Image (cartoon, grey):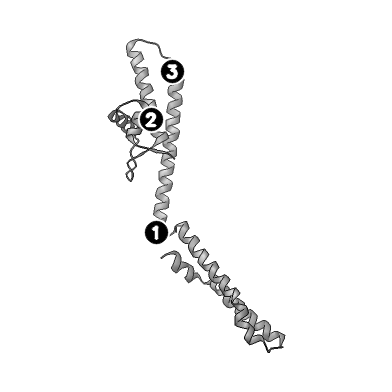
Amino acid sequence: MTRATISALAAENHIARSVALRHLNDAGIFRDPNDKTFDHDEASAAIKLRLDEDRINGNRVAGRASNGNSLDDEARRALNRSKAEAEQMRARKMRLQLEQAEGRLVEREAVEAVCRDIATRARSAFLSIGSKLAPRLAGMTDERQIRALIDQEAVAALGVLADPETFDKEALS
């Protein structure tokens, strides 16, 4: 979605900023409170629609015939589609903000960082099994004891992946 300032929209349509702002206010399109910009497509369609209406009305007043209704209807449909899309996006944004505020949504970067950390810990745990067990297994000959020690170390290494508290602490901090 492209954003545009009132100055850019006015310049693009060759009208004064105050006229562009009035057209947008009449259409119910308002600035984003955070960055004071408008959705370019929605705002541009609204301004063009008003300019077309003004042109058509001016032609009627002057007694000139106008068969521009198809363009007028098309511009209205485009504006309505744009408004509906903008409203859906605002609703989605509000849902996401609510979920984040309630703690049900965590930023992707935080989750990725925790996953990388857990994978690194698991890798280190598995790679250290050999050095931990080699001295203990050196003189052993009983297959069951060797298997039990290897299983014990593998379970401990897997514990890094299975610890939900590690994930919760790091993801939510």
Three-letter code, disc 2: Ala
Q: Using a 10 Å C-alpha cutoff, classify the residue at mark 1 as few (fewer than 14 neighbours), some (14 to 19) or many (20 or more).
A: few
Q: Residue 72: where, in percent of width, then height? A: 42, 22
- Foreground residue, 56 or 127? 127
Tag of residue 68: 3
Query: In which quadrant will I find the N terminus?
Result: top left
Residue 122 is left or right of residue 68, and the answer is right
Which residue is depicted at the point 44% across and 42% down? 88
- Residue 169: name its quadrant: bottom left
* Among numbered discs 3 and 2, the one appearing first in the sequence: 2
Inspect the image, locate mark 3, and give the three-letter code of the amino acid beneath it: Gly
**Residue picked out by circle 1:** 102
Helix, strand or loop status at disc 1: loop
**Image quarter hosting the C terminus:** bottom left
- In the rendered image, the vertical position of residue 128 relative to residue 103, given as above or below: below
Residue extending furthest bottom? 139
Question: Residue placed at 68% from the left, 82% from the top?
Answer: 147
